[in-house]
Image: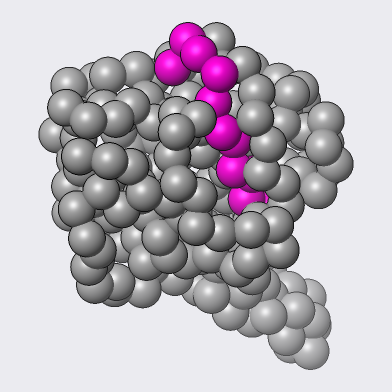
Amino acid sequence: MKKSALILEGLPTLGISLLLTIILFIINPWLSIFGFGIILFILYFFRDPERTIASEEGDILSPADGLVTNIFTVEENNYLKQKAICVSIFMSPLDVHINRSPIKGQVEYIKYQKGRFIPATKPESHEVNEKNFIGIKNEDIKVLVVQIAGIMARRIVNWARIEQTLDKGDKIGMIKFSSGTQIYLPVDTAITIKKGDKLLSGITVIGRYSK
């Protein structure tokens, strides 16, 4: 299991914030209040709560915390190479930004794609923004998780590696600040969530497949 997100990714940001706070204090002690506010937000943003991963065999777990903004069918040409169900999840700055593996399986596909940084709430952001693709398979199913940067998220973090074996709910990456995650599933997947639902990564069952 990966170390906490604060240790892995948040310490550099926290260090810069501490330095800024010291500078503000030197200029005027009252200004340091803003610096302490930034520090508290960073500690909150990079939180990495422990989660007990418990699900039935055949369950597909949410890869991200956030709000379901869309569920639609589309031709997926990167990894699945077939028509697929796409679930789009919006991650606000207040959500936990850790991405987790939705199934138990092996990482078969990773692809990074440069792009823009328009707000993740805009539908076109899923097409034009910077993103990272992670394809995972087991003997029964293949799924594709797509990490998508937003206007504030200028760095996508990928912890997955080709041929890595993952347990369901293992951490595979994170996206800094407001962003989005999509998961592509075979069209015969039984979807168990709907648009507007709030999801928790590694906890919420978003679909089921037949063994």
- Residue drawn at (57%, 49%) of the image: 176
129 or 6, which lies in front? 129
Q: Tell which of 56 and 125 is nearer to you.
A: 56
**Rendered position, 154 above or below 25:** above
Image quadrant assignment for residue 154: top right
Assess whether residue 46 is covered by the magenta stretch.
Answer: no
> Total marks drawn?
0
Q: Relative to 21, is 11 above or below?
A: above
Q: Where is residue 98 shown, x and y percent of the image?
A: 44, 55
Q: Position of residue 155 (x, y in %)?
A: 57, 38
In this picture, is 144 found above or below 43? above
Magenta stretch, residue numbers: 80-90
Residue 28 in which image quadrant: bottom right
Q: Tell me if I can see residue 65 in this picture.
A: no
Judged by its main secondary structure, the magenta piece is strand
Query: Quarter holding the C terminus?
Result: top left
- Residue found at the far bottom of this picture: 30
Q: Residue at x 24, y 63 (%)?
A: 55
Q: Judge by depth and name the residue closer to the eye, 166 or 160.
A: 166
User: Going by the image, does 76 lie left or right of 138?
Assistant: right
Q: Is residue 80 above or below residue 95?
A: above
Q: Position of residue 202 (x, y in %)?
A: 35, 60
Could you tell whether 75 is left or right of 186 in the image? Answer: right
- Is residue 135 visible in the rendered structure shown here? yes
Residue 19 lies left or right of residue 206; in this view the side is: right
Which colour assignment does the render follow?
A: one colour
Quarter of the image holding residue 160? top left
x, y percentage for residue 23?
A: 68, 69
In the rendered image, the quadrant that contains the N terminus is: bottom left
Residue depicted at x 68% and y 36%: 72
Residue at the (40%, 43%) spot, across then down: 173
Is 89 part of what is drawn in magenta? Answer: yes
